[in-house]
Amino acid sequence: MPTSRQSDGVRPAAVSATGLRKAYGEQTVLDGIDLHIPEGSVFALLGPNGAGKTTAVKILSTLVTADGGQARVAGHDIAGAPDRVRAAIGVTGQFSAVDGLITGAENMRLMADLNHLPGREGRRLAAELLDRFDLTDAADKQVQSYSGGMKRRLDIAMTLMGGPRIIFLDEPTTGLDPRSRHNVWSIVRALVAEGVTVLLTTQYLEEADELADRVAVLHHGRIAAEGSPEELKRTVPGGHVRLRFTDPAAYRNAAAALRETTRDDEALTLRLPSDGSQRELRAVLDWLDSAGIEADELTVHTPDLDDVFFALTGDATPARTEETAR
């Protein structure tokens, strides 16, 4: 289940942006987007290939400059105080930043040095994070021997060496197996429970549904829709109750009596429009009982983020790659 789902109105913004614009040559990647990400929440950016997700992360983390608009991260202007922004954030990119030729412990100590941590404190924090991410047993092994999930956990652990309160995760589970993906999800939930703010870009709609307090769908450089996963799902029609029969006579009787149904005479199924509410489901069951008709199977479909994404962008799912040239 999602981690926080708190009211945005009582929390200050960890990240805010107004009218962010970016173009590469004649290609406009971001066309004036606005963002408001409350502290201690997970905000997910979804969008097809080239929609601008990675570019938005790069701008907000000061890796590239915007062509227009303003943004503040951790209370600091990204253009006027980039060093202060960098000191407050952690970034885990699409591709692992670990060094495969050295050990996990050496990668962690390297990050401690880059964060100017005193030797003893750096070693202590590195050991704590390796233990937290279940990497202690592999700490003295070369990272090139790690699995994909282990490398991603190490990558996030390295990001935490500086104690950031805002973390940008750019497609953190791409290429991971289901177990490793769920491990990363658990890490994100634990971080948010500690008050960390996470801006997540993802190619997995299920991931946004599981983790995000709010979701923004980017399309052609603009935000096509924004809201909680539940709010976005309610904007899309298509919810229905599906009744399946094995008795042709029962199927025909139900089809004749029920209105606004979609029939499948070959599969002996009926589909009734429904918002999936308990009230509507009870009404269908009561009607079947009163008519003496028994369906062999009843299933409820409510719109999910796949439906939202398709309705807004015309694509069935986000693309598997994102702005690799950027």
Image (tube, rainbow, N blue to C red):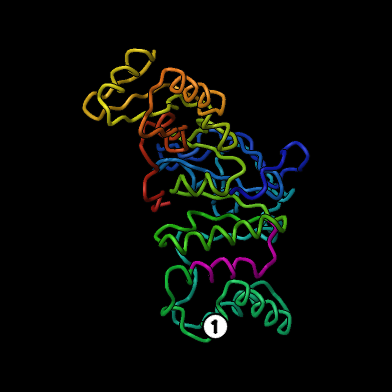
Q: Position of residue 226 (x, y in %)?
A: 57, 33
- Above/below status of 319 relative to 292: below
Label 1 environment density (alpha carbons within 10 Å; few <14, some 14–19, many ≥20)? many
As drawn, which residue projects farthest toward the left?
A: 266
Q: Is residue 133 above or below residue 50?
A: below
- In the picture, measured across the screen, residue 68 lies left or right of residue 313, that is right
Total number of numbered labels? Answer: 1
Against 214, is 172 above or below?
A: below
Q: Which residue is mark 1?
A: 139
Chief SS of the magenta region: helix
Whether residue 148 is visible here, answered yes or no, is yes
Q: Which residues are magenta?
A: 152-165
Which amino acid lies under the numbered mark 1 shown in the image of this protein? Ala
Please report the residue visible at 42 percent of the width from the left and 78 percent of the height from the top.
144
Corner quadrant of residue 230: top right
- Which of the 4 image quadrants contains residue 56? top right
- The image shows residue 59 at horizontal and vertical percentages of 56, 48
Q: How far across and how far down the image is residue 154, in percent?
A: 54, 71
Q: Nearer the viewer, residue 151 or 106?
A: 151
Along the horizontal axis of the image, is 52 left or right of 271? right
The one nearer the camera, 59 or 282, is 282
Q: Quadrant of residue 105?
A: bottom right
Residue at the bottom extreme, as displayed: 140
Q: Residue at x 47, y 42 (%)?
A: 52
Question: Residue 292 location, x and y as percent?
Answer: 40, 21
